[in-house]
Amino acid sequence: MLERRKEVELRKMASMASSSAYCYCKKYNKRYNISTLPQRIILSQTKEPDKKPTNQTTRREIILRSSELAVVGAIFNLSGKKPDYLGVQKNQPALALCPATKNCISTSENIGDLTHYAPPWDYNRGRKKPVSREVAMEELLHVIKSTKPDKFTPRIVEKKDDYVHVEYETPILGLVDDVEFWFPPGKDYVVEYRSASRLGNFDFDANRKRVKALRLELEKKGWASVDSF
């Protein structure tokens, strides 16, 4: 009886092995013995198709999303309106103070205001041979044009002998920050500045980082901060 069972089990295993040794080809509507097919064909039929790279799709999505954000910025005028109080103030010659929002720094603020105060610059402090105000102005303009902190695009909208107003615009939404530089009369080698965002309440230190990036470039020419704030 035991030998009979073993014989039945052996027959089942043989039938399963013989049936699995065949494959069905849909293209020719035929059944083939796998053992007679070349090994390369078997591997090519069983290999999973390679997945197409998604880099192209990802880039396309980024471009589309950037375009959509640019349209939104244009519709809602995210550039904001230029403040009327920019420039050197008439009552007391100085750049304007900052609003209460945390998206502005100015050398006109009180040194005790850690949120808004920034120290002025001295364009001859770091060099042996002093240069004129005209030369310092040219150095400042060159650094403004060649430096793009956080990929903001600088655009000089007003320039005088002692004053420069620059608009920094974000590449996608078109948000605008106003940055001013002023060479006050009677103060040797000193440059005052103010950097402020037109919209929002916070700038995540974008204005302070921008001024620092400009200062680091100017330091290569001999500029320096008046205070080590």
Image (cartoon, helix red, strand yellow):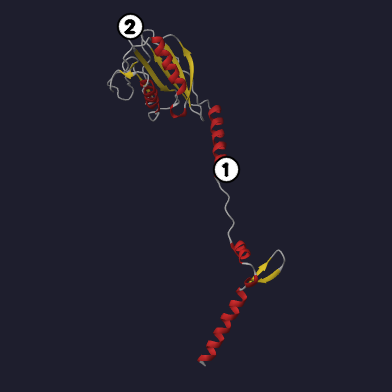
SS for tag 1? Answer: helix
Identified at 58% across, 50% down, the residue is: 52
- Residue 147 picture quarter: top left
Residue 23 placed where, x, y %?
A: 64, 70
Q: Residue 155, which numbered label?
A: none
Position of 178 with respect to 225 (left or right) is: right
SS for tag 2? Answer: loop
Q: Residue 186, which numbered label?
A: 2
* Amino acid, disc 2: Gly
- Rendered view: 38 above or below 175: below
* Local crowd size for mark 1, using a 10 Å CA cut-off: few (<14), some (14–19), many (≥20): few
Identify the residue position indicated by label 1 in the image.
56
Q: Earlier in the sequence, mark 1 or mark 2?
A: 1
* The furthest residue to the right: 28
* Amino acid, disc 1: Gln
Quadrant (top left/top right/bottom left/bottom right) for the C terminus:
top left
* The furthest residue to the bottom: 1
Residue 77 in view here = yes
- Residue 93 picture quarter: top left
Pick whichever, 190 or 36, lies toward us.
Answer: 36
* Local crowd size for mark 2, using a 10 Å CA cut-off: few (<14), some (14–19), many (≥20): few
Question: Are the residues flagged by discs 1 and 2 in contact, CB closer than 8 Å?
Answer: no
Residue 43 placed where, x, y %?
A: 59, 63
Residue 86 in view here = no
- Residue 13 picture quarter: bottom right
All told, the count of numbered labels is: 2
Rounded to the nearest angstrom, the CA distance separating label 1 from label 2 is: 59 Å
Residue 227 placed where, x, y %?
A: 28, 19
